[in-house]
Amino acid sequence: MYIVAIGWLYVALMMAITEHNVVAGVATFLMYGVAPVALVLYIMGTPGRRRRKAEAERAQATGTTSGEAARQEDE
């Protein structure tokens, strides 16, 4: 997943380099590169954040650490 994000940032950087002035280049890189990649990575990471939060809450309720809870589930 990260290789696609890196590739897109590279393409956006190349687009920004071809702009006629620095302000337009920075705006292009931020609007076509950084903003979309940040949004997509945030959305794609939501299930993992929810899972980690649920594990932490479950471990806190049982009084174990998250590593101990994972080992108990495997057994």
Image (spheres, grey):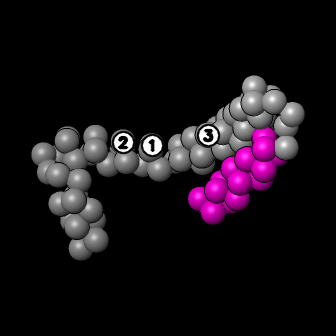
Disc 2 versus disc 3: distance between alpha carbons? 21 Å
For residue 55, above or below residue 74: above
Q: Quadrant of the C terminus?
A: bottom left
Does the CB distance between marks 2 and 3 fall below 8 Å? Answer: no
Give the quadrant of residue 24. top right
Disc 1 versus disc 2: distance between alpha carbons? 5 Å
Give the quadrant of residue 7. bottom right
Q: Is 70 included in the stretch rendered in magenta?
A: no
Mark 1: which amino acid?
Answer: Arg
| Residue at the limit of the structure toward the bottom, as seen here | 75
The residue to which callout 1 is attached is 50
Q: Could you say which is closer to the camera, residue 52 or residue 10?
A: 10
The residue to which callout 3 is attached is 38
Q: Is residue 29 left or right of residue 39?
A: right
- Tell me, yes or no, if residue 36 can be seen here: no
Q: Is residue 24 left or right of residue 49?
A: right
Q: Could you say which is closer to the camera, residue 53 or residue 15?
A: 15
Q: Mark number for residue 5?
A: none
Mark 2 and mark 3 lie on one chain; the one further toward the N terminus is 3
Mark 2: which amino acid?
Answer: Lys
Q: Residues within 10 Å of mark 2 (few under 14, many from 20)?
A: few
On the image, the x and y values in percent for residue 56 come to 28, 44
Q: Residues within 10 Å of mark 3 (few under 14, many from 20)?
A: few
Q: Which residues are magenta?
A: 1-17
The residue to which callout 2 is attached is 53
Residue at screen point 18% across, 60% down: 68
Does the CB distance between marks 1 and 2 fall below 8 Å? Answer: yes
Dot 3: element: helix
Q: Is residue 51 left or right of residue 55?
A: right
Mark 3: which amino acid?
Answer: Ala
